[in-house]
Image (cartoon, helix red, strand yellow):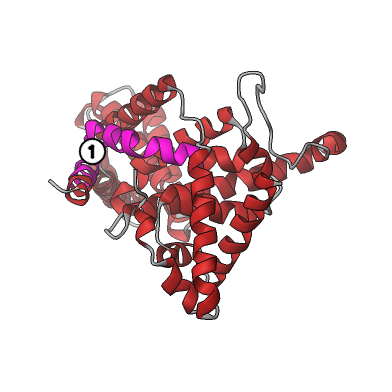
Amino acid sequence: MKHRNENDDLSALFERFVPSSNAEECAEEIRTADGLLRAHPAPQPRPEIIVGIKLAMAERLAERHRRPHPFFRFVGAAAAVIVVALIGILGRGPQSHPEVSHAALIPTAIWESDDLASDDHDIAYFASEIRQIETRMRALEAGDGEVEAVATLDEVEMELMRINTAFWKE
Amino acid sequence: MGEGAELTQIIEGCKSGYADSFAQLVDIYAGRCYGYFYRLTGDRDLSEELLSELFMKLVEKIASYKGGAFESWLFRIAANIFHDHLRARQRRNKLLDARRTELETAPTGWQKSDETDVKIDRLQSHLDRLDGDTRELIMLRFYSELSFKEIAALRSEPIGTALSKLHRGLKKLRELMEG
């Protein structure tokens, strides 16, 4: 089979760098050596290797289809940031207007419960969770690298969902 | 359909994520890429590993192919994989300090695996006597089938330099083979 680079006009190419009397000789030397390489072909990869490569590629493609698109990951992370920021703002509320902010955060079940000891414990737990999230948000804002940030945001998002679910189940 | 148009269609299929299109690329280029790796390493198992790495990288990077000679793009990745392998081996050799003497006495550093299974041809043994850069240039031109202009661009060196290195290298190789 003819190689694509056989279309190179070697003589013309050499003429740009060596005297034209030598150019054809140099070109001929390259053509001869090319023939030598063709006469000693390298072995071919084993068929099972080729099959394995094709399978691995198909698997990688399937994996990529399963993974959420980076855009959705970004949207999820952004949503988490907004929600966490809102909670952070509301969480800081108690310092100035404790009654209002607690009323907004605490579910009716706890608000109307008579079991004060248990409710205090729950509230302390949720407050500490929110403080932890706030701390992480500050660390993210300080910027610890994009990849790490996305991973951490995912974790924060998951944690937030978990807390939210647990919280409203009470 | 022309060869170029057919390849363009296959690449478009790859960009759309079709496994069949990637399989077609493997069928077209596996032999040449394997030959390239084999002639540089002299090791069948290692060449298969590098070949596999190349095609897996293709899955990740195909979206970044923006046209031009596909072979140029493909063999640039192949060359980078080979260089990464060399660097990793250098690091490994440093770690294996205790075994340094043993490693340095290997013919040219290329590992020959399972020699009973692989008949090392005369060409391979003579190739090992060329310097690494020249050997790489010769193999890049032969297996990628790129023009001198494309090779010079791929290697970021003037065309005259590439031409002169290749001429000297091939001349030496021919003398070794005939000697």
Which chain hosts label 1?
A: B
Up-down relation of residue A95 to residue A128 (above or below): below
According to the picture, the residue beneath numbered tag 1 turns out to be B17
- Image quadrant where residue A127 sits: top left
Quarter of the N terminus of chain A within the rendering: top left
Task: Locate residue B56 relative to residue B63 in the image: left or right.
Answer: right
Numbered range of the magenta stretch: B9-35
Q: Residue furthest left?
A: B1
Residue B70 can be seen in this image: yes
Residue at image position (37%, 29%) is A122
Is residue B26 part of the magenta span, yes or no? Answer: yes
Task: Locate residue A100 relative to residue B164 in the image: left or right.
Answer: left
Residue at image position (54%, 34%) is B47
Please state which of residues A152 and B84 is positioned toward the viewer in this rendering.
B84
Up-down relation of residue B79 to residue A115 (above or below): below
Residue at image position (20%, 49%) is B8
Quarter of the C terminus of chain A within the rendering: top left
Amino acid on which the number 1 mark rests in the picture: Gly
Name the dominant secondary structure of the magenta segment.
Answer: helix
Residue A29: give x, y in percent of width and height. Answer: 55, 60
Residue at image position (65%, 21%) is B114
Residue B158 can be seen in this image: no
